[in-house]
Amino acid sequence: MSTFNRAPLNEEAVQQALVRLDGWTFENDAIHRTFLFSTFREAMSFMVRVGFEAEALDHHPELTNVYNRVRVSLNTHDADNKVTELDAELARRINHFSWI
């Protein structure tokens, strides 16, 4: 289990986190980013990689896929579906391994 804080961040703290999270936006109590790949196969491999990172943190995102597009949405169910440090950490890890 991860040691990241699961307490909800206020909007100012979310905005501060987004400064360090290229491509992510805050909307409807979650942070989101859409990734566009060349092929469906690349999109699916990315989703699998996200799954491994999510499992390592015991934190599971909402993933939506249409052909070569993957949308990732993060918030913490244990924190009344608000954004936490754990969400920011998973977003940081996703940005780190993303090849787009």
Image (cartoon, grey):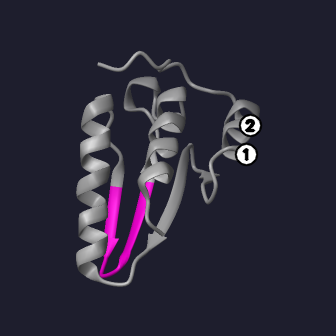
User: What is the quadrant of residue 12 in the picture?
Assistant: top right
Position above or below: 15 against 4: below
Circle 2 sits in a helix, a strand or a loop, which is it?
A: helix
| Image mark for residue 4 | none
Q: Nearer the viewer, residue 80 or 50?
A: 50
Return the x and y of residue 14 as percentages of the image width and height. Answer: 67, 37
Return the x and y of residue 53 as percentages of the image width and height. Answer: 31, 41
Q: Amino acid at mark 2?
A: Gln
Asked if labels 1 and 2 touch by Cβ distance under 8 angstroms, the answer is: yes
The span picked out in magenta is 63-72
Q: Is residue 10 left or right of residue 97?
A: right
Return the x and y of residue 87 as percentages of the image width and height. Answer: 48, 36
Residue shown at the point (46%, 28%) measured from the top left? 80
Label 1: how many residues lie within 10 Å, few (<14), some (14-19) or many (20+)? few
Residue shown at the point (30%, 82%) measured from the top left? 67
Q: Is residue 96 left or right of residue 19?
A: left
Quarter of the N terminus within the rendering: top left
Position above or below: 98 against 56: below
Residue shown at the point (67%, 45%) measured from the top left? 18
Residue 65 lies in the magenta-colored region = yes
- Dominant secondary structure of the residues highlighted in magenta in the image: strand
Q: Amino acid at mark 1?
A: Val
Q: Which residue is mark 1?
A: 19
Kindly report the distance in space between the C-alpha atoms of the residues bearing marks 2 and 1: 5 Å
Residue 29 lies in the magenta-colored region = no
Return the x and y of residue 68 as percentages of the image width and height. Answer: 35, 80
Q: Is residue 47 left or right of residue 5?
A: left
Residue shown at the point (42%, 64%) measured from the top left? 71
Q: Which residue is mark 2?
A: 16
